[in-house]
Image (cartoon, grey):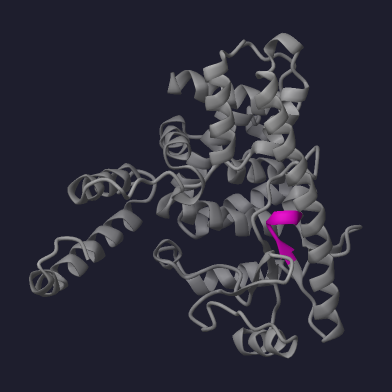
């Protein structure tokens, strides 16, 4: 059933985006419930509901489920309105204090969707140049108290505002995790991103949005990193699909040169494989020739683990959890061999150094 539901879900997304005019299924009530659960895990409830509204009556979900889905979609629309307002408000607040900002991902991506209010938002990512010290002083000067990641080792400072919105203020454009450190040079990645972020435009919504070229570069690193570390949902792939659809040939050529330069060719080919399989992205709009083999790995991972590994089961036994993690990491070996070897080497070094502590506590898992 899972394989069938995966195919149904991808077809529903194509209908929602206008890529297909026909939904070739009449799901059972049980299958519709599975599709709803999948849309929730993939953080695509709003987009998927747009697909439902385009279906003939006999192909739509049961009445009660349709009402529930409609309620969720309307809540997402309201959340988007709030996020647009808050993005504009922080842009103005920072500008009044002499800081020019840019909204990363999130609402900047949502503007590219056929229905900009259907994308399911999570937080507001806003970049403020000047470095950690200046960003910290700015936020403290605004009287924001509940700051997290208050250290220059992180790439952002987080807080939840009075309206319950999670805001991440970035003082770096990429985080220095193991996957990015294994790229040719983390500093080189930052250098390219920082030069491209200069090209921003003020949107009608009242915030600055980076160029498509910058978004292609930055979100390629972001997507690659999280696909390796924890798994990402189809929403992140849909974001990248929207960027590619709105990109120029020069933008795509530049992004592919960037991907080769930082050593993520296989990862890029895998991502293109997913975009071709799920969203029927034509090859002329891709950064490179897609890899069916690598793409299948990421495609399966998106359904197995959900958004940022949300489905990852840690309630299972220690040995099963250990085995699942090893298998998951090994599957990524063809896509990122250096990353896999580096991560496994560090894992076994850490395991060895913790043996005395495990003996002392008489516990296998710490």
Is residue 220 rendered to the left or right of residue 129?
left
Residue 304 at x, y percent in the picture: 42, 37
Q: Does residue 287 show up?
A: no
Residue at the extreme right:
204
Quarter holding the N terminus is: top left
Residue at the extreme front:
64
**The quadrant where residue 168 appears:** bottom right
**The quadrant where residue 143 appears:** bottom right
Residue 193 at x, y percent in the picture: 64, 67
Residue 162 at x, y percent in the picture: 73, 71
Q: Does residue 87 show up?
A: yes
From the viewer's perspective, is residue 359 above or below residue 66? below
User: What residue is shown at x 63% (from left), y 77% (from top)?
Assistant: 171
Compare residues 321 and 222 and report the one nearer the observer.
321
User: What residue is shown at x 22% (from left), y 47% (from top)?
Assistant: 317
* Residue 71 covered by magenta stretch: no
- Which residues are drawn in magenta? 103-107
User: What residue is shown at x 66% (from left), y 18% (from top)?
Assistant: 62
From the viewer's perspective, is residue 324 above or below residue 107? above
């Amino acid at each position: 059933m899972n394989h069938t539901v995966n195919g149904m879900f991808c077809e529903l997304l194509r209908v929602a985006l206008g890529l297909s005019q026909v939904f070739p299924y009449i799901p059972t009530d049980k299958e519709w419930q599975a599709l709803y659960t999948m849309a929730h895990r993939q953080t695509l409830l709003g987009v998927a509901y747009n697909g439902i509204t385009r279906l003939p009556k006999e192909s739509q979900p049961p009445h009660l489920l349709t009402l529930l889905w409609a309620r969720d979609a309307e809540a997402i629309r309201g959340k988007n309105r709030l996020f647009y307002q808050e993005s504009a408000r922080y842009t103005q607040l920072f500008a009044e204090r002499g800081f020019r900002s840019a909204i990363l991902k999130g609402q900047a991506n949502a503007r590219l969707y056929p229905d900009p209010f259907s994308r399911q938002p999570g937080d507001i990512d806003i970049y403020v140049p000047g470095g950690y010290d200046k960003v910290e002083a700015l936020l403290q000067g605004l009287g924001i108290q509940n700051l997290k990641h208050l250290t220059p080792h992180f790439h952002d400072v987080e807080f939840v505002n009075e309206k319950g919105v999670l805001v991440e203020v970035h003082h770096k454009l990429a985080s220095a995790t193991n996957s990015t450190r294994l790229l040719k040079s983390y500093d080189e990645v930052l250098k390219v991103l920082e030069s491209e972020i200069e090209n921003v435009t003020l949107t009608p919504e009242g915030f600055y949005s980076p160029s498509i070229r910058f978004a292609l570069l930055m979100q390629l690193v972001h997507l690659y990193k999280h696909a390796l570390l924890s798994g990402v949902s189809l929403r992140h792939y849909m974001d990248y699909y929207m960027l590619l659809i709105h990109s120029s040939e020069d933008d795509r050529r530049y992004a592919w040169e960037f991907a080769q330069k930082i050593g993520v060719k296989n990862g890029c080919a895998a991502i293109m494989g997913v975009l071709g399989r799920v969203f029927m992205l034509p090859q002329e709009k891709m950064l490179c020739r897609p890899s069916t083999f690598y793409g299948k790995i990421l495609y399966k991972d998106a359904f197995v683990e959900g958004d940022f590994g949300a489905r990852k089961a840690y309630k299972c036994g220690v040995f099963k959890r250990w085995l699942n993690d090893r298998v998951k990491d090994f599957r990524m070996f063809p896509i990122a061999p250096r990353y896999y070897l580096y991560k496994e080497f560090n894992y076994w070094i850490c395991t060895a150094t913790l043996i005395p502590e495990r003996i002392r506590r008489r516990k296998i898992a710490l």
